[in-house]
Amino acid sequence: MEKILVRKSNPLKGHVKIDGAKNSALPIIAASLLGTEDIILEDVPDLADVKVILKVLEKLGSEIEYLDNETVKINSSKLNSYQTPAKLMAQMRASFLVMGPLLARLGRTETHMPGGCAIGTRPIDLHLKGFKALGAIILENTDYIGAKAEKGLIGQVIYLDFPSVGATQNIMMAATHAKGETIIENAAKEPEIVDLANFLNKMGADIKGAGTSSIRIKGVNKLYGCTHQIIPDRIEASTFMVAAAISKGDVYIDNIITSHIRPVIAKLREIGCTITEFENEDRVRVIGPDKPKGTKIKTLPYPGFPTDVQAQFMALMTICEGISKVEETVFENRFMHVDELLKMGALIVTEGKEARIAGVPSLKGANVRATDLRAGAALILAGLVAEGTTAINDIYHIDRGYNNIVGKLRNLGANIDRIED
């Protein structure tokens, strides 16, 4: 087993380039099942989750070829299976996104319950509700879950009880081949939704309204091939911005779309960061404050403060002056990193969906574990300013969402290593 060792570091300085967005690459790779010609995807992040979903596509009959480290060619013209392997499905939740494309393309899909981080209940009922509204028959037993639409799907107005990103994506993909028009109301508005819609439209789909609460999809008979560049990862960008802040650093972050992370930028400025945005350039400069001030954050669906940055921001709050507060409204079990931060000397009290953090003069190194992907990133950030050495275990979670985070931080001057235990 590997672990990450972080020692108290000097202020981070230099440049870091952000990879393509994991949360955009995964649904777009799944959507490649709809294409009948070569698809070239650029800025594909080198992540464990990406490798898993590419293996899923191979098992379904797609041909996968890496043209370079960040460019993948996918050809699904010989798609020959609607059954996704249980072993791969158990490794991550996003693998469930192949259901929509398979239902549209083959009229049948059969899978197992998806895995991923244990950060709370993320029900798939909204996905299935959408498929059913389009005319699919839902198939369930103790071993698998599936859907079939042997005579094809029919466009319908679908209202989502919650603006679920995954459900919006899955229904949007399924509806590309539905007869007539499908309207998704109370749809998720995340940039990853817009990126997926742009990709599908390049293949020949007819989708309007992505990025708003109402998305319209007119069904087409066939989708083709295209070349598409994945958008930058706003969560990785936010993580490195917080790294600059917590270390009192001075970091230039390249390949970033600042409009995607407005709430994070606002809160970093609130705690005392100096953030410079460069006109007509995809970069920002973040200078951390000598004495960061406490603040409050409340996680919300986009365009609110992202739940995927909550843990990292809490790590920063542990050394902010005064009392800070976090309200988590998206996932009910996303405070698992609190116990690990407490081991490092943080002062945090949780009650239900809320956490109160009293800033301390310094943290101390400890033996901790990454309970989930973003918790692992938070512990790395805390380790940058903790006295002594922080040993982070279960780092396979971190590998699911960050490509070479150790190397990138080391290039900025962090005292960090990845070792065999």
Image (cartoon, helix red, strand yellow):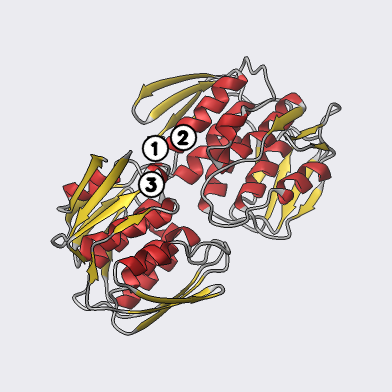
374, above or below 46, in the image:
below
Query: What number of labels is visible?
Result: 3
Where residue 146 sits in the image (x, y, percent)?
A: 75, 34
Location of residue 147 by image quarter: top right
Q: Is residue 358 left or right of residue 163?
A: left
Where residue 168 sits in the image (x, y, percent)?
A: 66, 49
155, above or below 339, in the image:
above
Location of residue 289 by image quarter: bottom left
Instruction: Name the residue type under label 1.
Output: Pro
Q: Earlier in the sequence, mark 1 or mark 2?
A: 1
Instruction: Name the residue type under label 2.
Output: Val
Residue ID for mark 1:
45
Residue ID for mark 2:
50
Residue ID for mark 3:
394
Instruction: Give the quarter of the figure containing the N terminus.
Output: top left
Report helix, strand or loop for mark 2. helix
> Which mark lies nearer to you, 1 or 2?
2
